[in-house]
Amino acid sequence: MSNEDIDRLKTLEPVGVDTDAILFAAGKASARPNRFWQFACAGLLLSNGALAIWTFAPSVEVQGVHRPEATPIIVDESIPIVAEPSSYLALGKNPDGLGPWPESIPATQSPPLRAMSRDWP
């Protein structure tokens, strides 16, 4: 083949053939259609829709539960409360045999400590 023939072949263009369309059709034919992803996306779409409806739908008011009325407790104060000597109540009344608790605690000279206070000695 001469250079003249090669130059003539270079100038030729195919008529009616679209190379982009051929490549697109070949790529589409090579990929198998997989229905799994279509069903998976449809299932996710339905579950998200159901969740949105369940979340934003107005809730049904719960009917009140019937509870029986509380019966009052009647305390008979005529019965004296006697504490055993080894009980906590007896210890509070007479700790270590030192006598009864004082009615009031005497005030100290310094103010009481409080949270975040800096008035401590």
Image: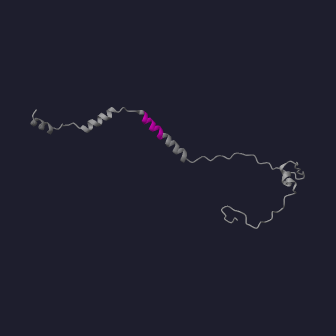
**Looking at the figure, which quarter contains the C terminus?**
bottom right
Q: Position of residue 93 (x, y in %)?
A: 86, 54
Can you say whether 30 is above or below 70 in the image? above
Compared to residue 6, the image places residue 97 above or below, namely below
Identify the image quadrant of the N terminus: top left
Answer left or right for 121 relative to 99. left
- For the point 12% across and 36% down, the residue is 6
Residue nearer the viewer, 92 or 121: 121
Vertical arrangement, residue 46 with respect to residue 91, above or below: above
Q: Is residue 16 left or right of residue 105?
A: left
The residue stretch that appears in magenta: 36-45
Q: Position of residue 94 (x, y in %)?
A: 86, 54
Residue in front for this viewpoint, 12 or 42 = 12
Front residue of this view, candidates 107 and 71: 107
Residue 114 in magenta stretch:
no
* Residue in the picture at 47% in, 39% down: 44
- 119 versus 86 height, above or below: below
